[in-house]
Image (tube, rainbow, N blue to C red):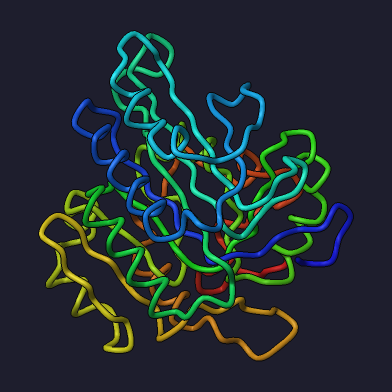
Amino acid sequence: MVGSNPPLTLGLYAAFYLTSRPESEPRLVAAHEAYVTRYGQHLCMFLEDDTGKPRPFGKAERDYPRRRLAKSGTSSVFWHATGNTDPKFASSWTVTGEVERPDVEHGPDTLSGMWFSLHPDTAPAEFLEHAFTTVSLLDPYHGQAGYGVIEPPDIVATQMAWPGIAAVAHRFAGVEVNGFSTTSVWAMDGIKSVNWLTILSEELVERVGGRKSLRRKLSTDIVFHELPKTLVLQAGPAPKMGDVNGVDELQLYREVAQTLKPIFSKTVNSALLYPDLGEWRDRLFKGAKWPP
């Protein structure tokens, strides 16, 4: 845990956003079940629909997304499984899903999605492998993966942690700040940010000139993982935290950010994701001063 009051939890974090369409729902179920099959032994507690009381994680909870999404008439479905037994504390073992069914408020283009985290000591190759598994199941619109601060399930505890989250974000430019639900509402016109892995749909790839154009623009140090409907850009052999007080180790992150700048969302800003983070989303652009 990162030192703060309350303590913060660091994990290897991956977030995936999908357009909210009926065909997205079975993909989210499959991605949830893939995580539970591989890492379910680390999960202890389950919450549903944001307002549900926490309960132990068991077989019924493993099957919850499949059963819940089979029901119609619900505009939003949320589930959260974690490796801690107290909702006031986060765990680096977490899987969360959020399905937004189009309604009057959000219209037809609201994003759904899921995110997962692994213990920070997990080997980069294993993290990469499970991220690829999830991408192949989801065909996401966009996403990112690297180090991240994991929020506790309890919203009051998360709010109390905001100053610590902001402090970590100012110190470590490679650490993702989640804002998952906020991003799902606002980042419909482009990507939220970049990280060790930056995940792009074919639509977004075409908006920056296509795969061949991107390959020419980016150095050979950026690994291209080409899937039929998705491109994953890997910035180096392992994720970095990017301590701003140390040697700059995020040159490849910055290269990806600069190249993808035209498809950064215009409707997301740092203030929507977290208070006190200023220009956090611009931290990796060439010439950007971070901390401000």
The answer to which image quadrant residue 103 occupies is top left
Image position of 279 with respect to 217: above or below: above
Comparing 19 with 134, the one in front is 134
Is residue 292 visible in the rendered image? The answer is no
The answer to which image quadrant residue 165 occupies is bottom right
The answer to which image quadrant residue 99 occupies is top left
Q: Is residue 123 left or right of residue 46?
A: left
Instruction: State which quarter of the image contains the C terminus.
Output: bottom right
Comparing 72 with 43, the one in front is 43
**What residue is shown at x 19% (from left), y 80% (from top)?**
216
Is residue 273 visible in the rendered image? The answer is yes
**What residue is shown at x 23% (from left), y 60% (from top)?**
208
Q: Residue 230: x, y in percent?
A: 20, 58
Comparing 81 with 225, the one in front is 81
Q: Is residue 139 left or right of residue 50?
A: left
Query: Quick one: which residue is furthest to the right in this view?
Result: 5
